[in-house]
Image (cartoon, grey):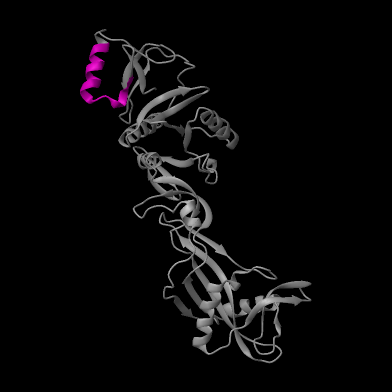
């Protein structure tokens, strides 16, 4: 059921005709005043309207045409949505377009850029996606896939955009980065750049760092000091994507607890509580059979081994006996590939902008006391 036909030799898309033009064409065909043939096979076609109200062309005689495969009414409906959306975005759009070894449901062209939109109605393996995508890439065409099968959707990749698409009686919705939207909005977003691939989440500001502080009695001198653990760094992107880095390191040479901004922030809490800050530096440990960045007592210099601190942290958390400190700090981006959608708050900043971030203002931190 193609949308495209040759009307007196002119390529014509059925759904781009007005009601008056469609009726006029139907009248002319019945009166024999014009010729309507399907492209590629040259078979005489007639005008028809699907149950979903989509005007299209069809073979006059039933046949197993190698140039035009059978389509469901919903597939046809989705193709029409894509054509209309692409044109609304200012792009030329032609259904059933062909190239070297490929046939696109809809080919959208804007300047030198070409997008082939595929409504993948049947199940397709990852290898089949890859194979067909390579054919598009060979012709400098960007393939975009809308599949009914959620299990067919790969992890987000710039070179293989595949989105789960659900078909209802009279609507088609597409899931982009966990958000369902009308298929037309997804097409317009992809063509206008309001939906774009990002390897990371970034806002233009540093991540939010969460640090837990613990009062620890030295096993040797019984003096109490404050040691700390960076739990995670979090960035909530403008597109709604949350990315985080969780930390739970033992016997590490390089650990986030040693960051200068973390040290400064924890020192503020230690001063406020009137508790000395534990030392943090390279120490040798027989348990670890080597040196690592470790905490130690500020009074007697006894090593606070990571293995023992881990057990202490688990018990303290179970009793809510710790201080949680939250403040802006750390990197300006967290790696997390995703399809970034501008829903009114913008998109994650690009790689160059995110890499240039060195920190933000020293904002008043949020502090929550557990006891």
Magenta segment boundaries in residue numbering? 12-29
Residue 124 position within the rendered picture, expressed as x and y whole percent measured from the top left: 55, 34
Q: Which is the main secondary structure of the residues drawn in magenta?
A: helix
| 328 relative to 34 in the view: left or right | right
Residue visible at 53% across and 32% down in the picture: 133
Residue 371: tell me if it is visible.
no
Q: Residue at x 64, y 91 (%)?
A: 223
Q: In this view, does 231 lie to the left or right of 328?
A: right
Which residue appears farthest toward the left when viewing the image? 20
Res. 301 image quadrant: bottom right
Please tell me in which quadrant of the rendered image residue 185 appears: top left
Q: Is 201 drawn above or below residue 150 in the view shown? A: below
Left or right of 13, for residue 128: right
Relative to 256, residue 321 above or below: below
Relative vertical location of residue 283 with respect to residue 351 in this rendering, above or below? below
Q: Which of 221 and 253 is in front in this view?
A: 253
Asked whether the viewer can see residue 234, the reply is: yes
Task: Give percent across and percent down for residue 85.
Answer: 34, 36
In the image shown, does 117 or 361 lie closer to the viewer? 361
Residue extending farthest top:
32
Image quadrant holding the N terminus, namely top left
Q: Which residue is at the front of the view, 209 or 40?
A: 209
For the residue pair 118 and 253, the one nearer the viewer reads as: 253
Residue 15 counted in the magenta span: yes
Q: Which residue is drawn at 60% across and 34% down?
A: 127
Residue 100 is covered by the magenta coloring: no
Q: How many labels does the image show?
A: 0
Q: Where is residue 95 shown, x and y percent of the image?
A: 39, 26
Q: Where is residue 324 in the image (x, y as percent from the top left)?
A: 51, 77
- Compared to residue 252, the image places residue 147 above or below, namely above
């Amino acid at each position: 059921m193609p949308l495209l036909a040759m009307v007196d030799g002119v390529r014509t898309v059925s759904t781009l005709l007005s009601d008056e033009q469609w009726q006029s064409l139907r009248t002319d065909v019945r009166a024999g005043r014009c010729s309507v043939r399907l492209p590629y096979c040259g078979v005489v076609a007639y005008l028809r309207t699907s149950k979903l109200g989509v005007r299209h062309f069809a073979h006059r005689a039933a046949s197993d045409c190698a140039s035009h495969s059978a389509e469901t009414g919903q597939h046809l409906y989705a193709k029409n949505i894509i054509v209309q959306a692409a044109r609304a975005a200012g792009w030329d759009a032609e259904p059933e377009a062909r190239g070297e070894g490929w046939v696109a449901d809809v080919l959208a062209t804007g300047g030198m850029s070409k997008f082939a939109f595929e409504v993948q109605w049947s199940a397709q393996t990852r290898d089949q996606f890859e194979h067909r995508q390579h054919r598009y890439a060979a012709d400098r065409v960007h393939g975009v896939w809308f599949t009914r099968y959620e299990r067919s959707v790969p992890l987000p990749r710039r070179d293989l955009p595949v989105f789960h698409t659900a078909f209802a009686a009279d609507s088609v919705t597409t899931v982009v980065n966990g958000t369902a939207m009308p298929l037309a909005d997804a097409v317009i977003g992809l063509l206008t750049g309001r939906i774009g691939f990002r390897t990371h989440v970034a806002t233009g500001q540093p991540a939010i760092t969460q640090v837990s502080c613990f009062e620890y009695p030295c096993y040797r001198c019984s003096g109490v000091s404050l040691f700390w653990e960076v739990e995670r760094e979090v960035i909530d992107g403008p597109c709604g994507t949350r990315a985080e880095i969780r930390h739970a390191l033992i016997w590490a040479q390089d650990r986030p607890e040693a960051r200068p901004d973390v040290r400064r922030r924890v020192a503020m809490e230690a001063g406020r509580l009137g508790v000395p800050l534990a030392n943090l530096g390279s120490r040798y440990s027989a348990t670890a059979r080597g040196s690592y960045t470790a905490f130690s007592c500020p009074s007697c210099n006894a090593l606070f081994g990571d293995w023992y601190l881990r057990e202490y942290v688990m018990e303290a958390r179970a009793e809510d006996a710790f201080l949680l400190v939250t403040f802006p700090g750390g990197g300006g981006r967290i790696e997390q590939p995703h399809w970034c959608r501008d829903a009114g708050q913008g998109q994650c900043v690009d790689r160059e902008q995110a890499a240039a971030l060195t920190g933000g203002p020293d904002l008043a931190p949020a502090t929550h006391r557990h006891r």
